[in-house]
Image (cartoon, rainbow, N blue to C red):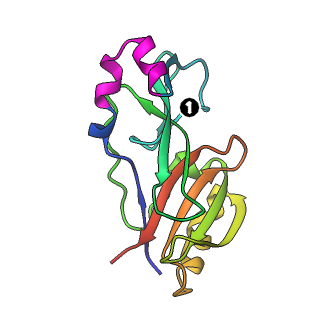
């Protein structure tokens, strides 16, 4: 079963970089300079930020559905990041290189299964998950720090 991993739209975050540090704090966010690589995965470019780059760490509502699983979590966004245009079935290096928590949801936004696996196993696990018609979509989280990584849907 084909799948599509979705990056976040750059325009949703571009205005954050013009804000003062005080204004960022008011939005549950902060500006950081990347000190090491890997370690700062951008959810727009779907790549690790480079050492010396400016990023915004912010709280992002990745599960807005009306359900007990409604959730927000931290994400990083790189300054001037271009939105990744991932191909159907493509798992970017930023996910392949980490331990990932795969969380499966039904059409009522209820989690029906989950697993933790190495990112290089992700493509096969997602394909297998979408063989089950009850699975409507998936969320990926970094397993160690737990940050939201991406959403996944069936590809047409």
Residue 30 visible in the picture: yes
**Picture residue at 47% right of the left edge, 81% below the top:** 1
Please name the residue shown 48% across and 41% down the image: 60
Residue under label 1, please give it: 40
Q: For this rendering, which residue is in front, 91 or 72?
A: 72
Check if residue 156 falls in the magenta segment. Answer: no
Principal secondary structure, stretch drawn in magenta? helix
In percent of width and height, residue 53 lies at 45, 19
127 lies left or right of 22? right
Q: Nearer the viewer, residue 29 or 68?
A: 68
Q: Is residue 3 left or right of residue 106?
A: left
Residue segment shown in magenta:
14-27
In the rendered image, which quarter is residue 78 located in? Answer: top left
Where 153 sits versus 142, above or below?
A: below
Q: Position of residue 108 (x, y in %)?
A: 50, 75
Q: Decide: is 7 above or below 42.
A: below
**114 or 109, nearer to the observer:** 109
- Residue 155: horizontal and vertical position, in percent? 37, 74
Give the image location of residue 50, x and y in percent: 49, 25
Secondary structure type for disc 1: loop
Q: Is residue 54 visible?
A: no
Note whether 8 is above or below 56 in the view shown: below
Other-residue count near label 1 (Cα within 10 Å), few / some / many at <14 / 14–19 / ≥20: many
20 in magenta? yes
Which residue is depicted at the point 56% across and 31% down? 40
């Amino acid at each position: 079963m084909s799948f599509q991993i979705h990056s976040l739209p750059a325009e949703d975050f571009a205005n954050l970089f013009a804000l003062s540090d005080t204004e960022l704090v008011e939005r549950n966010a902060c500006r950081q300079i990347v000190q090491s690589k890997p370690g700062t995965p951008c959810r727009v470019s779907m790549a690790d930020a480079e050492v010396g780059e400016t990023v915004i760490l912010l709280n992002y509502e990745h599960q807005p559905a009306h359900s007990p699983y409604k959730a927000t979590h931290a994400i990083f966004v790189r300054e001037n990041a271009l939105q990744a245009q991932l191909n159907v079935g493509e798992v970017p290096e930023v996910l392949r290189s980490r331990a990932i928590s795969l969380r499966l949801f039904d059409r009522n936004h209820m989690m029906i299964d989950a697993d933790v696996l190495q990112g290089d196993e992700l493509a096969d696990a997602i394909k297998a998950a979408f063989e089950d018609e009850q699975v409507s979509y998936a969320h990926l989280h970094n397993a160690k720090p737990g940050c939201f990584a991406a959403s996944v849907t069936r590809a047409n």
